[in-house]
Image (cartoon, rainbow, N blue to C red):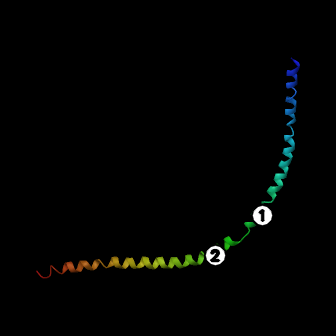
């Protein structure tokens, strides 16, 4: 009877054979080369489209500033108009 159990123990050795996992690690080096292919991403960055976008915004911004100052000046005039109300108040005392 002791012999059969002994045979069960040897199977453990085959499990150790699983060590073939190491060969799989060899495929890992293959993956790094694939990363070299992504270099195409940097090529997409060179497009000077960004600089061109910076140029157009400049002209439109200059057109807007002149419009604001002009609108701010008119409001000041209307405020000066209320003072004329004072003179009429002085008129009533004249009749008596």
Residue holding disc 1: 40
Q: Position of residue 44 (x, y in %)?
A: 73, 66
Q: Position of residue 81 (x, y in %)?
A: 31, 79
Horizontal side of residue 38 vs 17, given as left or right: left
The residue under the point 27% across, 80% down is 84
Horizontal side of residue 67 vs 51, given as left or right: left
Foreground pick, 24 / 80? 24
Horizontal side of residue 41 vs 95, given as left or right: right
Figure quadrant of the N terminus: top right
| Above/below status of 47 relative to 2 | below
Label ID, residue 55: 2
Horizontal side of residue 21 vs 87, given as left or right: right
Quadrant in the picture for residue 55: bottom right
Q: Position of residue 7 (x, y in %)?
A: 88, 24
The residue under the point 76% across, 66% down is 43
Foreground pick, 93 / 15? 15
| Above/below status of 44 relative to 7 | below
Q: Nearer the viewer, mark 2 or mark 1?
A: 1
């Amino acid at each position: 009877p002791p012999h059969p159990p002994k045979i069960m123990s040897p199977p453990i050795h085959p499990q150790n054979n699983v060590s073939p996992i190491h060969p799989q690690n060899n495929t890992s080096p293959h993956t790094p080369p694939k990363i070299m292919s992504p270099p195409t991403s940097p090529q997409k960055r060179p497009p000077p489209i960004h600089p061109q976008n910076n140029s157009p915004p400049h002209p439109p911004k200059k057109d807007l500033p002149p419009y604001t100052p002009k609108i701010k000046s008119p409001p000041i005039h209307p405020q000066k108009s209320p003072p004329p109300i004072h003179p009429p108040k002085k008129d009533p005392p004249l009749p008596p």
